[in-house]
Every structure is written in structure tokens, then in C-alpha cells.
Image (spheres, grey):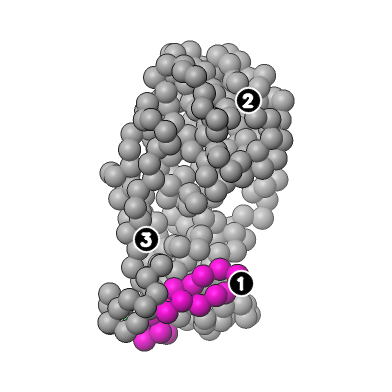
Amino acid sequence: MPELPEVEITRRGVVPHLAGQTIRRVIVRVPKLRWPVPPEIARLKNRRVISVGRRAKYLLVELAGGHIIIHLGMTGSIRVLPAPRPAAKHDHIDVHLANGKVLRYTDPRRFGCWLWSETADHKLFANFGPEPLTARFSAKYLFEKSRKKTTPVKPWLMDCRVVVGVGNIYASESLFRAQISPKRRARTLTLADCQRLATAIKQVLRQSIKHGGTTIRDFLGAEGQPGYYARKLKVYDHAGEPCPRCGATIKKITQTQRSTFYCPKCQR
Ligand SMILES: [Zn+2]
């Protein structure tokens, strides 16, 4: 599943091809993804792309007069074709640009979405917490937000009202890096714990974006989907293996129906 780093890599991959271009027309072959694709999308023509932004795991394509909001769901991907070519089974949406290139959206399981919004402030984002890679997401913020919270810290971090874009994999990896047990109640975090945790989250996400950005196949003209990179993970999916820090055996537990991986010895 694309997590925040993959969405950010997608954004950076398509920006050079999209920004400043004009949309000539949009072809919607499958009108229902996770939600119906609104008719405004198929009617877009002669609109200039001003920017491509991101909020949590949503891409925001800013046009003159509105925004296309895109989520990649479980299996969605975007690539840029140098010229139109026939669509395969799961190629659901094509955006034809004035320069002849085509932005193609592919999504076998159709859990992604394409929505239209006049403003950048869609109701989907109403309860979202801060972006993890901004200054607003700090030790002080985490400390204040976690007071009185009895939820274990790992599911607490995955709550988008606390911080957006920290999914299952990166929550486990960040807690490992910060040496904090995923089972600790959020309210027991000290300010020093929050400092290590905020730093760890930023580092884990930044490294992943950097690593992915250098290893992902080109967004322009690649056959099939852009290949997501193999993530470099320390504990996630490594149950039974030795901890890379202390050598103890990495454990797998379930928290709120999601798998958690951690080292019971050096994460406290
Ligand atoms: Zn360990």
C-alpha cells in the first residue's frame, strides 16, 4: 500500500511534467473508484495546472478554479506517458495535456479516489492533525497532545487527528528508532521521549522519501506501474529475527487489528 513517502515520491515525480501545463481533456473510463468520480472531473478542459501539492496521503492538483484531490488507495499509481496510447484493463483515468503527454491513473483494486473541490480545504481534511515533516509537528506538540491519553502509543500515532501519514509500517519503525515500546500508554511519554519520537518519525519518513526517490523507476513512460521501491525496514516484518541494535528477538503483536513489530529488550 502506498504510504506517505510513496505519495510524496509520486508528487515529486509528476510535478515537472504537470506544473504550468494546460489540461486539454480528461477521460474517465471507470466512473466509480472508492467513491463515484464527480462529473466535474470529466468536464475539465483548457485549465492550467498551477501546482501539485500533498495533504497526508492525498495529492492536490491545483488548477485555475479548483482542485483535483487524488488518493492512491491500496493499489493506485500514476505515471506520465509521452503520448496517448491504448489503455489496459486497470487504466481508469487519463488526463491529456496540451504538450501531448498523458497523466494515467491505474488502480486494479479501485480503492483510490478522484474528487473535485473548489477549495484546497476539503471536508476530508477537517480533522487532520499536522503534517509530520513540518515544524508544527514537534516534541512539545506530541507531549501536549498525549496528556491523559490512555491509548497505547502505536495506535495513537496512527490516528490522523494526532498526525497524518504515519501508517502501520512507519509507526513501528519510528518507535523502534526512538526506543519506545509500542505498548506504552501515550500519556506516559515524557518530553524527552516525545523529542526522540518526533525526530525519529521525521528521519524515518525523510530517509524513505530519499531512498525511494533514488531507486523508483521513472514516472515518465515506464511500462506498467511505476515500481515502488523495496523499503529498508529494521523491525517491520522481521519477527523472530535478531534486533539490529541489541540482538534480542523481534516480536510481533497485534494492536487494534494491525501487526506491530518491536524489540522487547531495547524499546521501553
Ligand atoms: Zn533491541
Looking at this view, is 91 or 72 the one in front? Answer: 91
Instruction: Look at 57% across and 46% down and name the residue there.
Output: 73
Q: Secondary structure at mark 3?
A: helix
Q: How far is disc 3 from disc 1 in space, using C-alphas?
A: 23 Å
Mark 2 / mark 1, whichever is N-terminal: 2
The residue pinned by badge 1 equals 256
Q: Secondary structure at mark 2?
A: loop
- Residue 20 shows up from this direction: no
Tags 3 and 2 in contact by the CB under 8 Å rule? no
Tags 3 and 1 in contact by the CB under 8 Å rule? no
Amino acid on which disc 1 is placed: Thr
- The boundaries of the magenta stretch are 251-268
**Residue 212, horizontal then vertical, whole percent:** 34, 47
Is the residue marked by circle 2 packed among few (<14), some (14-19), or many (20+) residues within 10 Å? some
Q: Is residue 170 magenta?
A: no
Q: Secondary structure at mark 1?
A: loop
Instruction: Look at 51% across and 27% down and name the residue there.
Output: 88
Amino acid on which disc 2 is placed: Arg
The residue pinned by badge 2 equals 29
Amino acid on which disc 3 is placed: Val
Image mark for residue 204: 3
Is the residue marked by circle 3 packed among few (<14), some (14-19), or many (20+) residues within 10 Å? some
**Residue 266, horizontal then vertical, whole percent:** 35, 83
Looking at this view, is 71 or 84 the one in front? Answer: 84
